[in-house]
């Protein structure tokens, strides 16, 4: 009996990685850095607002 032909087909070796994520060492995405900078600015503004109250 040929056991290699039985069962489910095997997935690709690298299939556990999300395709939309940048790999390690790849150049940074401009949109992601802009979002992070905007979030940081909002957090700093909120912290300042809490200090003044």
Image (spheres, rainbow, N blue to C red):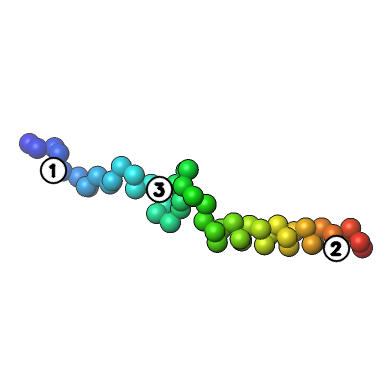
State which quarter of the image contains the N terminus: top left
The residue that label 2 is drawn on is 49
Q: Secondary structure at mark 2?
A: helix
State which quarter of the image contains the C terminus: bottom right
Q: Secondary structure at mark 3?
A: loop
Residue 17: numbered disc: 3
Bin the neighbour count of mark 1 within 10 Å (Cα to Cα): few under 14, some 14-19, many 20 and up.
few
Closer to the observer: label 3 or label 1? 3
Residue 20 drawn above or below residue 8: below
Choose between 36 and 17: the one closer to the eye.
Answer: 36
Closer to the observer: label 1 or label 2? 2
Q: Residue at x 73, y 60 (%)?
A: 41
Q: Is residue 24 left or right of residue 12?
A: right
The answer to which of marks 1 and 2 sits earlier in the sequence is: 1
Question: Which quadrant of the figure has residue 38?
Answer: bottom right
Q: Residue at x 79, y 62 (%)?
A: 45
The residue that label 1 is drawn on is 5
Residue 17 drawn above or below residue 3: below
Question: Which quadrant of the figure has residue 37?
Answer: bottom right
Q: Residue at x 46, y 53 (%)?
A: 21
Q: Residue furthest left?
A: 1
The answer to which of marks 2 and 3 sits earlier in the sequence is: 3
User: Whole-Å distance between the Cαs marked 3 and 1?
Assistant: 26 Å
Q: Is residue 40 left or right of residue 6?
A: right
């Amino acid at each position: 009996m040929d056991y290699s032909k039985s069962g489910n087909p095997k997935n690709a070796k690298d299939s556990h990685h999300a395709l939309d994520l940048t790999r390690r060492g790849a150049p940074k995405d401009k949109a992601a850095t802009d979002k992070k900078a905007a979030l940081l600015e909002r957090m700093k503004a909120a912290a300042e607002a809490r200090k003044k109250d």
